[in-house]
Amino acid sequence: SQKIEQNSEALNIQEGKTATLTCNYTNYSPAYLQWYRQDPGRGPVFLLLIRENEKEKRKERLKVTFDTTLKQSLFHITASQPADSATYLCALAPDSGYSTLTFGKGTMLLVSP
Amino acid sequence: DAGITQSPRHKVTETGTPVTLRCHQTENHRYMYWYRQDPGHGLRLIHYSYGVKDTDKGEVSDGYSVSRSKTEDFLLTLESATSSQTSVYFCAISGGSQGADGYTFGSGTRLTVV
């Protein structure tokens, strides 16, 4: 069956360190993968998209990698700040045709001062 | 959230009653989606629309219906609410196919069925 897996345990790090979150998938051949941020009581907010033919994408302090061989995406936040504390969701479109997004369950990131 | 509003924000309803949630967008986007979010399940797609009067089922569509008579409005109806439909409901929009430009989500509707 198709699965998207994100670490269900919260990631606790200290301010200034790099946070790395993982998204693994099985039985998908996604055309692209997206990352979202969700704060409590709010809807998810789109952060980054990476396509299957891209290895890495950067936006300010964010970096995403996409390894279609390992079926894995890594999401990095460098120089993390307490304001980065949130739940981060990965999402993918199952194939290259028109399709909707399927979301992982998310990983909570807690950045302590 | 800019360009997309959901109403109501909170609702408590009784088992067996019909309930309609509304999603309104001002972005003129073609694609609209309804998701529900539950602890342990994450976001799951209920229904989506790819144009006026064009809708399709998602992963968890049983007990739900949708309508889209105008580009800007996408309605989700629980035909006869059950306790298992207690959830947070999110509407989302996207301009391109496949959501390649990312989805924009509304602030959600917290629905409690008692």
Image: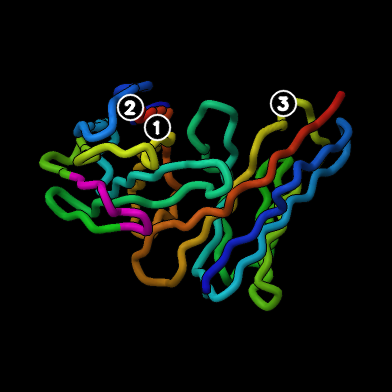
Residue linked to disc 1: B106
Visible in this render: residue B23? no
How packed mark 1 is, by other alpha carbons closer than 10 Å (few <14, some 14-19, many 20 or more), is many
Q: Is residue A6 left or right of residue B108?
A: right
Q: Is A96 in front, or is B57?
A: B57
**What amino acid is at disc 1?**
Gly
| Mark 2 and mark 3 on one chain | no
Looking at the rendered image, the quarter that the C terminus of chain B falls into is top left
**What amino acid is at disc 3?**
Ala
Q: Secondary structure at mark 2?
A: strand
Could you say where residue A103 lies in the image, as x and y percent from the top left? 52, 53
Q: Secondary structure at mark 1?
A: loop
Q: Magenta span has B63? A: yes
Residue linked to disc 3: A83
Residue linked to disc 2: B5
Q: CA distance from mark 2 to mark 3?
A: 25 Å
Q: Are marks 1 and 3 in contact (CB under 8 Å)?
A: no
Identify the mark at residue B63; answer none if there is no mark. Answer: none
Image vertical order of residue B23 relative to residue B64, above or below = above
Q: Is B13 in front, or is B108?
A: B13
Residue span colored magenta = B58-66
Q: Is residue B38 left or right of residue B9?
A: right
Given the image, what chain letter belongs to the residue carrying mark 2? B
- Residue at x 61% of width, y 67% of height: A25
How packed mark 3 is, by other alpha carbons closer than 10 Å (few <14, some 14-19, many 20 or more), is few
Q: CA distance from mark 2 to mark 1?
A: 6 Å
**What amino acid is at disc 2?**
Thr
How packed mark 2 is, by other alpha carbons closer than 10 Å (few <14, some 14-19, many 20 or more), is many
